[in-house]
Amino acid sequence: MSESSLAQPTSSPIPRALVPAAGQGVRLLPATRAQAKEMLPLGATPIIQLVAEELLLAGVNSVLIVTGRGKESIENHFDGTPPTDDTSAPERSVFDRHTMQFFYTRQSSPRGLGDAILHGQGFAGDQDFVVALGDCVIIGDSRPSLLERMIRLHREQRASATVAVQQ
């Protein structure tokens, strides 16, 4: 994502997002035996990085990532520690400049998406929040983005929930 594309969202943003990332990644074995599936690269960028950039683009500034066993690399990726190589330096600095905060909670055993979302109950309170799957990337160059359009529709319709599905 280019720095110039990080302009303000087109509608009133939903400032909080929950990113479930506790799944075991069994369908991607053996690749996920040593690496969290959310940290697998798409090109040179971890998938969860692209998810976070899409959230940032849509105006989200506070993200709760629900992790599980073997997902420490996700926290390490976003913890703000200076990187050990030059390739990941620009990634973290994008979030620093746009004040995106990351929080973590751990799902002690994988009990599915609903349970992961329940882990964020206190994080969002009674406010609207985005659920963005940590291993699902929606790539597009259109502005506003799909997420921005969904947020706008959600606000306009005063919906209880707005869900994107693919046929």
Image: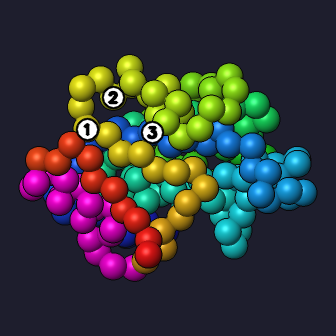
Residue picked out by circle 2: 124
Please, is residue 10 above or below residue 115 in the view? below
Q: In this picture, which residue range is highlighted in magenta?
A: 141-157
Is the residue marked by circle 3 packed among few (<14), some (14-19), or many (20+) residues within 10 Å? many
User: Which SS class for mark 2?
Assistant: helix
Q: Main secondary structure of the magenta part?
A: helix
The residue located at (48%, 73%) in the rendering is 139
Residue picked out by circle 1: 128
Q: Do labels 3 and 2 touch, CB within 8 Å?
A: yes
| Residue 31 image label | none
- Three-letter code, disc 3: Leu
Labels 3 and 1: the sequence-earlier one: 3
- Three-letter code, disc 1: Asp
Q: Do labels 2 and 1 touch, CB within 8 Å?
A: yes
Residue picked out by circle 3: 18
Q: Is residue 151 magenta?
A: yes
Q: Is residue 29 magenta?
A: no
The quadrant in which the C terminus is found is bottom left
Is the residue marked by circle 2 packed among few (<14), some (14-19), or many (20+) residues within 10 Å? some
Give the quarter of the image for residue 135: bottom right
Question: In this image, 29 relative to 19: left or right?
Answer: right
Question: In this image, 16 relative to 63: left or right?
Answer: left
The residue located at (10%, 54%) in the rendering is 157
Q: How many marks?
A: 3
- Three-letter code, disc 2: Ala
User: Which SS class for mark 3?
Assistant: strand
Q: Position of residue 49 (x, y in %)?
A: 58, 55
Q: Position of residue 109 (x, y in %)?
A: 70, 26
Q: Position of residue 102 (x, y in %)?
A: 50, 35
User: Which SS class for mark 1?
Assistant: loop
